[in-house]
Amino acid sequence: MRILFMGTPEIAATALGRLIADGKNIVAAVTREDKPRGRGNVMTPTPVKSLALENGIPVYTPKTLRDVSFMQILGECAPDLIVVVAYGKILPREVLEYPTHGCINMHVSLLPKYRGAAPMQRAIMEGESETGVTVMYMDEGLDTGDILSTVAFSISDTDDFESIHDRSAELGSRLLSETVDAIAQGNVKRIKQDSSLATYAAKVEKEDCKIDFTLDAPTVDRRIRGVTPIPGAFCYLNGKMLKICRASVTDGCGTPGEVITLDSVGAGSITVACGSGAISVSTLIPEGKGRMSAGDFIRGRKIQIGDILK
């Protein structure tokens, strides 16, 4: 079966790598255009493009999927199946209807919950006890197609976006490869989504990353973990940005945002009052500095009891 792969970020490259390793016939990869990155603004390919070229797979970077040039690409590749992982663009109807076996998508949530752009982050932020990956047929809606397969796993109170991302990539890639095999064998069962159970995972905006210490401590902790390590949760101390990378819920009370205890021994900790309870900060990034332990930050005399994080 001839497969056209469409995707952009690292999680998509992990999925493509699994398909390649499992011997799938990837006839081409479609990804986003190279972008300038780093201080030197060096034009950098997407992870999918890099991996595809390493494996001798032709790569296309169309600006749009809605003109004749992309239909010509489809004609040249003649895919039996299109596999999409975090591509970031809506597929028009003529693309969805082109392959004999349709288009499938690996979505990182247990659909119909958390349709949309940021399912992993929102699952953590909303306090879900589990999440997972769904492979579905694509239609013209937003993550509304028939479900083909799922895999679930738990979310612990120490998981952050990075750990959930990595687990989703690993388990989802295996599930995707198995589902492709099942489609080739004509051995898949389509399950319609119950849209009455659907929730939406909106894109993470800057405001989502600003820490609101008036909320209760568990909520503050989840919101920090949901955007760690990127884009990162932040607040301000004495007018300078302070990113909080790792924290945990603890006892304590005070004005929301107030530093109520400091422990400078070893890795150390900074206890900050919330609307209810407190969080213990263990790792942070001061403005203009690298990642450091709370202990190092305290020993540098950058923070005092009674300071207010805003």
Image (cartoon, rainbow, N blue to C red):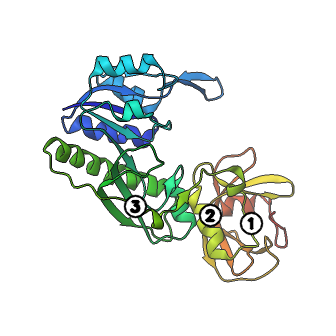
Amino acid on which the number 1 mark rests in the picture: Asp
Q: What element does badge 2 sit on?
A: helix
**Of residues 80 and 50, which is closer to you in this image?**
80
Mark 1 lies on residue: 212
Q: Is residue 244 above or below residue 81?
A: below
**Along the horizontal axis of the image, is 29 left or right of 228?**
left
Q: Is residue 10 visible?
A: yes
Mark 3 lies on residue: 110
Neighbourhood count class around disc 3 (C-alpha, 10 Å): few under 14, some 14–19, many 20 upward:
many
**Of residues 128 and 47, which is closer to you in this image?**
128
In which quadrant of the rendered image does the N terminus lie?
A: top left
Q: Is residue 262 visible?
A: no
Give the foreground label among 2 and 3. 3
What is the distance, in whole Å, between disc 2 and disc 1 at their CAs?
Answer: 9 Å
Give the residue furthest to the left.
185
Neighbourhood count class around disc 1 (C-alpha, 10 Å): few under 14, some 14–19, many 20 upward:
many
The image quadrant of residue 307 is bottom right
Q: Residue at x 27, y 28 (%)?
A: 79
**Of residues 162 and 292, which is closer to you in this image?**
162
Contact check, label 2 and label 1, Cβ < 8 Å = yes
In which quadrant of the rendered image does the C terminus lie?
A: bottom right
Q: Residue at x 79, y 74 (%)?
A: 256
Mark 2 lies on residue: 223
